[in-house]
Amino acid sequence: MRIRLLSAAALLAFAVAPAFAAPVTYKLDPAHTIVLAQWNHFGFSNPSASFTDVDGTLVYDAANVAKSSVQVTLPLTGLNGFSTKFNEHLRSGDFFDATTFPSATFKSTKVEAAGEGKLKVTGDLTVKDVTRPVVLDVTLNKAGEHPMSKAPAIGFDATATVSRTEFGLGKFAPAVSDEVKLRITTEASVPKAK
């Protein structure tokens, strides 16, 4: 009888442990974090550009996802349209005006559970000093010890659709689609203590 009570107590403790789990703060890995943007070009093609060299912090609370958050900076030095000429055009005053506005940012305002391994992350995207709300549909890929760093790590994929004209990037719209589809993949790890 005593063994049964101890086993039941251990099971109960295990079951309620996640309720007391603290949020974990992760640093985004810029080598494994990419934001890919895609749009339609006059109906002829669907080109894309990537944003790399991403810097940011992700706080994840598995027991209460509403306490989770993300804050990201996208330096426009990491903007790649896969052609030198196109990179220059994207960074020019026609679009991002990267000399005046060297980065874009995203800061979450709300995180909600959206099913098993799914989240809905609402936040403020700022481009060229214009801030608009954006909703990310997020999938948790994996959480656990990273095999290379041996540090706690987490990985997510996300999608969103934004209107480029809302951010002052509307040149050639609507012939070049206003709607831009975003695909994001990220890995993040708990920083090692210094």
Image (cartoon, grey):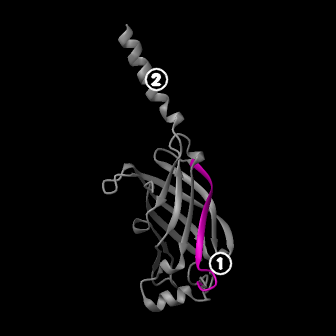
Residue 128 is marked as: 1
Label 2, label 1: how many angstroms apart (C-alpha)? 52 Å
State whether residue 45 appears in this view.
yes
Q: What is the magenta segment's predominant secondary structure?
A: strand
Query: Type of residue at label 1?
Result: Lys
Query: Type of residue at label 2?
Result: Leu
- The picture places residue 96, in percent across and down from the top left corner, at 59, 82
Which type of secondary structure does the marked residue at label 1 adopt? Answer: loop
**Which one is nearer the viewer's eye here, 18 or 132?**
18
Residue under the point 41% across and 13% down: 5
Task: Answer above or below: position of 78 versus 93.
Answer: above
Task: Answer above or below: position of 21 versus 173.
Answer: above
Circle nearer the N terminus (2, 1): 2
Residue under the point 48% across and 87% down: 87
Quadrant assignment for the N terminus: top left
State whether residue 46 appears in this view.
no
- The picture places residue 36, in percent across and down from the top left corner, at 47, 71
Looking at the rendering, which quadrant does residue 102 occupy? bottom right
Quadrant assignment for the C terminus: bottom left
**Left or right of 190 in this view: 170:** right
Magenta region: 98-112
**Left or right of 98 in this view: 130:** right
Seen as rendered, the residue at the extreme top is 1
Which type of secondary structure does the marked residue at label 2 adopt? Answer: helix
Residue 12 is marked as: 2
